[in-house]
Amino acid sequence: MCGIVGIEFSDNVTKNNIFVWIKKTLTVSSRRGKDSSGISFITETSNNFHEVTSFKSENSIFELLKHEKIKNFINNNHNTKKKINYVIAHTRMATNGNSTNSNNQPIINEKNKNLFVFNGIITNSENLIKKYKIKKNTLNDGLALSILDKDNKRKKYIKGAYSLIKISFKKFLTFSCMTNNGSLYISNNPNKDLKKIILSESSFFKKLNISNFKQGEINHLYLFKNKEISKNIKFKTYNILQSNKSVNVFDVEKENINKFLKKQIDKRSQYLLEKIYRCKKCVLPQTHPFIIFDKNGICNFCNNYNKKKFLPKKKLEDIINLVKKKYGQRSILSSISGGRDSSYALHVLCREFNIRPITYTYDWGLNTDIARRNVSIMTGELNVENILISADIRKKRENVRKNIIAWLKKPHLGIVPLFMAGDKQFISNVSILKKELNSKLEIFASNNHEITQFKEEFSNFKLWPDHSSHMPNKMSLYSQLKLISFYGFQFLKNPAYLNSSMLDSLTGFFNYYHSETNELQIFDYVEWNENKINQTLIKKYGWETAIDTPGTWRIGDGTAAFYNFIYFMYAGFTENDVLRSYLIRDGQLKRNKALELVNLENQVRLPTLEWYFKLLELDMKKILNHIIKSSWKYNNISF
């Protein structure tokens, strides 16, 4: 998931230009990760002796490059007696292992005399490390790529997407690279300072004004041998410890919950199940905003429902083929979050429409590792390039933390969507990529079964018709103004919301409702069938599911477990009830089966909640108890 850089310098490059090129290449690469960073310099002495000097930082590349040790090293090691010939570096988005230096790249193996940087996630890393008895001195999953040292045919055993830049010291100094998904680009002799440069994305070359570059072929090992070298290699690593705390990374695990808390959750849940009245046709409850039941007990959403008419699949095929023929398949951009819909959409595009689009992922810091691994599983298996844009994860998490603390002071269901404001840049970033890639078609994977408009309508404003055929981000301007007025009033009532997250929240609102992207929704043409989607992803690709729910929806979104807990404790339903109700109306599900499913899916996802609060450094027990207690007297819901 990182931005990676490999540079071979020309013989006459100056000290100043070495630093300039490092700064420029890592700055453009930093949008793939800002959690931590690392740089390795390969220096050659006049007697053919090589030194590997690495600098690792627990902070962003911007902070690392400010450190005097970097500039001093370049000044002291590039002269008439020594030359800095190579640099490999990375700017990391933390996945496996916290952003501490022990987990950072470059990954260095002094025994085997090599070092490398990579992007992606090796989803079977633990099995490979155990099978090949690799010494485990880091939590970084890239350690599994060490199996490529002896025999590159072993690449077939590696699961997940990856791109690798490596320097080895055997008889020859070897500069090499390889990718199994295409997120690697190479330029030979780009200018007088550089003999070779390797980067993660094509747009990075354009930003550096380098025009002669090519994409690395899938699963092709590029070897760039140098002259014979001395057997004596010296390795030295400097760990730069800086002020910002590390970015925490860990998996969702079985919870260790207080028995009294569990009893309180069960008590509230049982009360709601006994008290709430549901539509006789679907499963929407009386607590859903603006619901009205007729004399037969059927809700207005069912009475006003019009079954979706799919556009001809042939029309989608024609659109794709036209773009592919005129501009090439790389002009097609497809979003992938690691969730089931976007994962299945990529399967359809690759297997049914025979294209390999460029995929795009936005990570805002509260995606679970399941989501990240599923992106890697799909793009690695389908050999599809993935462009990652990573937020400033420290800042995003702090903003969510502040808004949760503020919300707890005066709980209101209409404010809950604020917790997800930081995620909305996933839409606006498509516009950025569209310009960079000159893409002609942007494909998204939303579908009308998953429209959860109740979240905004807990504001007590009617914002949509009873059944809207539009995606939630297509809200009318008048409704947007009503929603803004609601938020403004709540902020005045609760000044705790007036914190440093406000700009991010405001940006999220405009990103969501005023995106310039005119995306094509694949499920307007392709039938959405839950069983088919699940079976395809799990059986064909080994797509991962969660340990704390039988459902596959929203399992890659860490915030979903929290907001659904709130909705259930206060109103007795979650977004699962909405999805199941749509499927009943659409004829895909019987009501009895829907009730069975929501009873299972609405159970509190305690392991994910524990993961979520640990990530935000909040007291789960205290917060859940507070929510349960206040839910009993929440005055906006009546039975």
Image (cartoon, grey):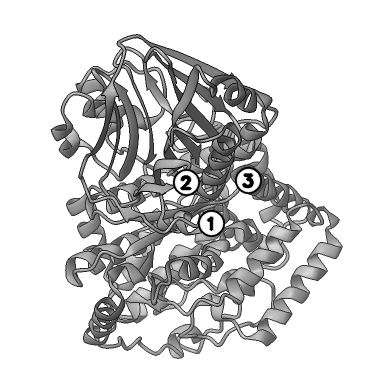
Q: Is residue 108 left or right of residue 258?
A: left
Q: Give the vertical position of 284 relative to 367 (above or below).
A: below
Could you classify mark 3 by the number of other residues whose Cα lies within 10 Å: few (under 14), some (14-19), or many (20 or more)?
many
Q: Residue 490 appears in which quarter of the rendering?
A: bottom right
Q: Identify the mark nearer the N-term, 1 or 3.
A: 3
Instruction: Name the mark on residue 179.
Output: none
Quadrant housing the C terminus:
bottom right
Q: Considering depth in this image, is 400 or 287 the residue closer to the camera? A: 400
Instruction: Name the mark on residue 397.
Output: 3
Instruction: Give the x, y percent position of residue 472.
Output: 53, 76
Secondary structure beneath disc 1?
helix
Q: CA distance from mark 3 to mark 2?
A: 20 Å
Q: Identify the mark nearer the N-term, 3 or 2.
A: 3
- Name the residue beneath numbered marker 1: 564
Q: Are marks 1 and 2 in contact (CB under 8 Å)?
A: yes
Instruction: Give the x, y percent position of residue 129.
Output: 27, 24
Residue 299 visible in the snapshot: no
Q: Is residue 292 left or right of residue 125?
A: right
Instruction: Give the x, y percent position of residue 224.
Output: 27, 35
- Name the residue beneath numbered marker 2: 605
